Image (tube, helix red, strand yellow):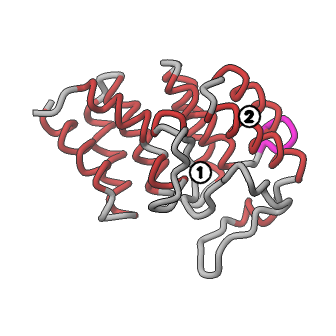
Amino acid sequence: MFRLEFAALLFLSASLYAQFPAGRIPPQVTPAATLLTASGERPIFDEFPPLPSNPKPAGSVVSLRELQHPIPRKAAQKAFDAQKLANRNKIPQAIAKLEEALRIAPEYRDAHCNLGVLYGRLGRLAEARAEFQKALDIGPPASAIYFNLALISLQTGEYGEAQNWAQKALKLDPANRRAEIALEIALSR
């Protein structure tokens, strides 16, 4: 049987698969220091600053809101700076940078998602949940966001909610092993 502490570890490392392709994880970066992009499509590396409009790969899903509200370069740079701070485990400073990015671009879905991950790392679960909900509201739905919501629900003892979120994550990505584990934990409670 899985323990709730295992779910907490999953929460801290949930972003690893979305952020760095296999074999490209810098040695100084641990799973707990890596942030999650909501889309899971564009890794952020220290040597490559984000482009002003954050283009999506051909064939990816882009919401109407994303098209109507392109991310200003200044907001993308603040989020990139937050990524570097988080990689150095400077979480309060990284949070401040993401909050600045969101003041510039309130529709910046990945910034909401990354802020949710950082809030979760500090145990600020209600704030983390709110950021993930904002990311979902901006859309489109993403398995990674549903997975993070499932883990927050597990941590707060809301097992029915955790089951719901994990099932949504699996519906979008049936190969999401972490969502499977979250679902198993929720069902065992």
Q: Of 102 and 12, which appears nearest the observer? A: 12
For label 2, the residue is 98
Dominant SS in magenta: helix
Name the amino acid type tagged 1. Thr
Q: Nearer the viewer, residue 93 or 38?
A: 93
Q: Quadrant of residue 152?
A: top left
Q: How many marks?
A: 2
Q: Residue at x 54, y 29 (%)?
A: 128
Mark 2, Cα crowd under 10 Å, few <14 / some 14-19 / many 20+, is many
Q: Quadrant of the N terminus?
A: top left
Task: Give SS at disc 1.
Answer: loop
Could you say where residue 26 lies in the image, as x and y percent from the top left?
55, 48
Q: Earlier in the sequence, mark 2 or mark 1?
A: 1
Q: Looking at the picture, how far across and down is residue 111, in whole percent?
A: 69, 43
- At 63% from the left and 30% from the top, the residue drawn is 88
Q: Which residue extends farthest left? A: 1
In the image, farthest residue toward the front: 27
Horizontal side of 74 relative to 137 (left or right) equals: right
Check disc 2 and give the amino acid type: Leu
Quadrant of res 159: top left
Above or below, 22 against 189 in this view is below
Alpha carbons under labels 2 and 1: distance apart? 13 Å
Residue 162 colored in magenta in the image: no
Circle 2 SS class: helix
Residue at the disc numbered 1: 37
The residue located at (25%, 26%) in the rendering is 4
> What is the x, y in percent for residue 149?
43, 39
Name the quarter where the C terminus is drawn. Answer: top left
- The span shown in magenta is 102-106
> Which residue does the image show at 60% across and 81% down from the upper left?
59
